[in-house]
Image (cartoon, rainbow, N blue to C red):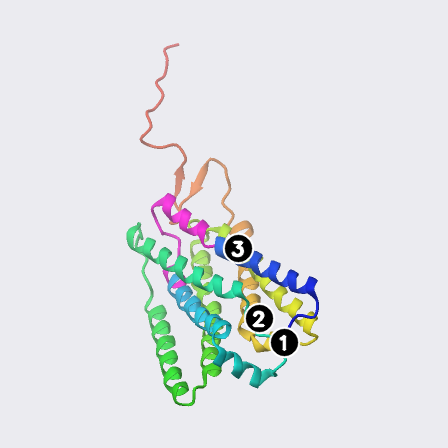
């Protein structure tokens, strides 16, 4: 069984992994808090949430299976070499569990807060049904031959595809509204940190093992990191450059109306006699 050659690299790998876990985990909370404060989910794309929970559920299955299952680990080493390290860390499993739980809670907020006229699109429903049916078919095919590594690799591929798809509705919604109001930029900044450190983990392991096997042995983690960074940069540009809301005494609402910061219910000041 493979082990680390360098203790400092091992420690750095673990530190980066857990910082990525904290950053990615905390990234869910700004949106949850924003929804709670506004008592509204207007501006948050529901397709994004549905795709997100499908993605994270698939990633959880992959991470948990490769980290905990001796059968999957054995098949991994048979395919990539007996001296190869398993490319899933404890922080990957912990993140996946937390991500599924927080995304489910955000979906619960959609049910109890003001939604405006927003709803899940038929396209989103169709894609999600296709993904679930595909997973079921793959399970049926893998069961007789116990092709567990192939099966979890399918879930890994699904999460990569869903990662690319899930960001598109929110990015397009921001473009249509010419606004990022209701969409938490704190989520994106923390997400970016997690993506960079996640990719750095793979690099550190490659340096220690003197091989690039872990990059394509866990191609899902590699592509996930790249996709996260690219889309987060796009969202940052949308928020701070393309659709910047100026603090000039007025706030642009998600629908594009301009609303005075002064509460209309406040009493108007009386004019004194001169």
Q: Position of residue 112 (x, y in %)?
A: 29, 52
Dot 3 lies on which element?
helix
Q: Position of residue 60 (x, y in %)?
A: 44, 68
Residue 45 magenta-drawn? yes
Q: State if disc 1 and disc 3 touch (CB < 8 Å).
A: no
Q: Earlier in the sequence, mark 1 or mark 2?
A: 1
The residue to which callout 1 is attached is: 2
Residue 272 magenta-highlighted: no
What stretch of residues is rendered in magenta?
27-48
Q: Which residue is mark 2?
A: 222
Structural crowding at the residue carrying mark 3, measured as other residues with C-alpha within 10 Å and reported as few (<14), some (14–19) or many (≥20) = some
Number of other residues with Cα within 10 Å of mark 2, as a class: few under 14, some 14 to 19, many 20 or more: many
Find numbered disc 2 in the image and state the secondary structure of the residue it sits on: helix
Looking at the rendered structure, which numbered label has been put on residue 22? 3
Q: Nearer the viewer, residue 146 or 164?
A: 146
Quarter in which the N terminus is drawn = bottom right
Residue displayed at 57% across by 56% down: 19
């Amino acid at each position: 069984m493979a082990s680390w050659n360098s203790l400092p690299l091992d420690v750095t790998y673990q530190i980066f992994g857990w910082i990525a876990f904290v950053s990615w985990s905390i990234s869910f909370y700004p949106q949850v808090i924003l929804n709670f404060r506004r008592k509204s989910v207007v501006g948050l794309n529901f397709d994004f949430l549905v795709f997100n929970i499908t993605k994270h559920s698939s990633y959880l299955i992959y991470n948990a299976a490769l980290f905990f299952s001796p059968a999957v680990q054995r098949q991994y080493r048979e395919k990539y070499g007996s001296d190869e390290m398993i490319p899933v860390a404890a922080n990957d499993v912990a993140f996946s569990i937390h991500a599924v739980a927080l995304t489910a809670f955000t979906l619960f907020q959609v049910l109890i807060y003001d939604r405006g006229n927003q709803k899940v699109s038929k396209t989103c429903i169709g894609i999600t049904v296709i993904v679930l049916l595909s997973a079921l078919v793959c399970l049926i095919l893998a069961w007789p031959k116990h092709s567990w590594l192939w099966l979890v690799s399918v879930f890994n591929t699904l999460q990569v595809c869903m990662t690319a798809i899930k960001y598109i509705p929110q990015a397009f919604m921001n473009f249509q509204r010419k606004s990022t109001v209701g969409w938490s930029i704190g989520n994106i900044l923390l997400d970016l940190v997690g993506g960079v450190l996640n990719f750095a983990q793979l690099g550190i392991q490659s340096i220690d093992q003197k091989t690039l096997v872990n990059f394509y042995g866990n191609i899902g983690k590699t592509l996930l990191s790249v996709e996260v960074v690219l889309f987060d940069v796009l969202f940052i540009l949308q928020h701070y450059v393309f659709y910047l809301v100026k603090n000039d005494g007025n706030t642009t609402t998600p629908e594009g109306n301009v609303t005075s910061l002064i509460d209309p219910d406040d009493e108007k000041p009386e004019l004194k006699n001169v």
